[in-house]
Amino acid sequence: MVSDSPVLAESASARRLLILIAPALVVGVASALILLGISLLAEQLQDVLWETLPQALSIGGYSSLWMIVMLTATGLAIGLVIRTVHGHAGSDPATTGLVDPPMPPDVIPGLLVVTVLALAGGVSLGPENPITAANIALAFWLGRRIAPQTPAALWIPLASAGTIGALFGTPIAAALILSESLAADGGAPGALWDRLFGPLAAGAAGALTMSLLAHPGFGLSLPPYPGPHWGDLLSSVVITSAAALLGLAAVYAFPYAHRAFRTLRHPVLMLTCGGLLLGTLGGHLTLFKGLDEVKELSADPNGWSAGQFATMAVVKTAALVTAATCGFRGGRIFPAVFVGVTLGLCAHAAVDAVPPALAVPCAVLGVLLAITRQGWLSLFTAAVLVSDAAVLPLLCVASLPGWLLVTGRPQMQLHGDGTPLR
């Protein structure tokens, strides 16, 4: 039969992939613009709340009093919004992941409002979860109306890839994350790449849009890695494993903290108490999502003692668990990176022979393995922080004992009944 010709089948497959390019580019660019718009709005509000307003009141912007007042007020404001808006700004964030099924589109405005308030108010969460959820919902809703004949499952990977590409400034991150959830159909050669074709285009569009408009950068200004030594192999394994254990401590504390906040029953009360607790936890370096703060720390790796770095890591871990369980909407990747960076700098400060360009990515790798349970994401994020290929083999080796520690353990995500997801 002519219709069974391999050449014709290949041509049909190629045409099917080519059709994906236009919607993938549109979704990728739109995802990046939404992320950029929310980020810029949050930054403007942050300047008002943490600089303009305290200066007008003659109060130190990062004094203990102002941090307590500001974070408590942020929790109260977000609680009132969640209580008032349609859809209550989405599901309980403790039960959601990075890529979830699309929510109703009328929930998106409330979700974006509380995301801006949390980012600006100093809550220790990143923008990745709520922005990805909003972009998935918008792409799914609009895509099904503009092209109702398209499969419903098309829009979720496109929107998630576009957002992840914009967040990390590269489509590789999106491809790596989605490759863990997209199984190749029947194991045929190239099947996985067929399924990643559209998401990779969306991720590239999102990353390029963000890079051209905002010039994001994840690289840290650490001293260059001098090159691998035999001692570095032991150091990488020990640091990654120790960081994974701290991440697991947060994971195991997660359901207990969630249960404690749920005893308060009312979202306004839960978030206000959560904000008050966040305000009392630490200093200004442990506030916000943590990306700008890790750049400040890495610019002077010898500026703090090992004890100070360890304290910051523990405080940020506690702040992450608190923020993610009391009802604040936000992601866990960026604060987890902060925890890893401070742990790595702690290891360097404690043992000067351990290069910071090795200690930092190893610690980030361990924390992310425990908190995200995404192996490729953890390895990629750790590697991109130092942008040195000489570190990559050591990270690959260190990831093995790190993964053995975390695999099969509970995840930092709960079922609807509050039990840990495995």
Image: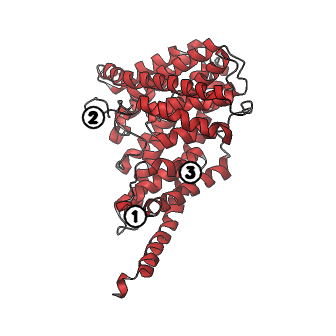
Q: Residue at x 49, y 22 (%)?
A: 317
Q: Position of residue 228 (x, y in %)?
A: 68, 33
Of the image marks 3 and 2, the number of the one nearer the N terminus: 3
Task: Name the element at disc 3.
Answer: helix
Can residue 235 be seen in the rendering of this structure?
yes
Disc 2 and disc 1: Cα gap in Å?
Answer: 37 Å
Of the image marks 2 and 1, the number of the one nearer the N terminus: 1
Amino acid at dot 1: Ala
Amino acid at dot 2: Gly
Disc 3 and disc 2: Cα gap in Å?
Answer: 32 Å
Task: Name the element at disc 1.
Answer: loop
Disc 1 and disc 3: Cα gap in Å?
Answer: 22 Å
Foreground of the two, 155 or 67: 155
Q: Position of residue 108 (x, y in %)?
A: 41, 46
Is 112 positioned to the left or the right of 170 in the image? left
Mark 2, residues whose alpha carbon is within 10 Å: few (<14), some, or many (≥20)? few
Residue sitting at the far left: 417
Q: Which residue is mark 2?
A: 416
Whether residues under marks 3 and 2 lie with C-beta atoms below 8 angstroms apart, the answer is no
Q: Which residue is mark 3?
A: 172
Of the image marks 1 and 3, the number of the one nearer the N terminus: 3
Q: Position of residue 250 (x, y in %)?
A: 43, 23
Q: Which mark is residue 188?
A: 1
Is 234 positioned to the left or the right of 83 in the image? right
Q: Is residue 205 above or below residue 313?
A: below
Viewer-nearest of discs 3 and 2: 3
Q: Which mark is residue 244?
A: none
Mark 3, residues whose alpha carbon is within 10 Å: few (<14), some, or many (≥20)? some
Q: Residue at x 48, y 22 (%)?
A: 246
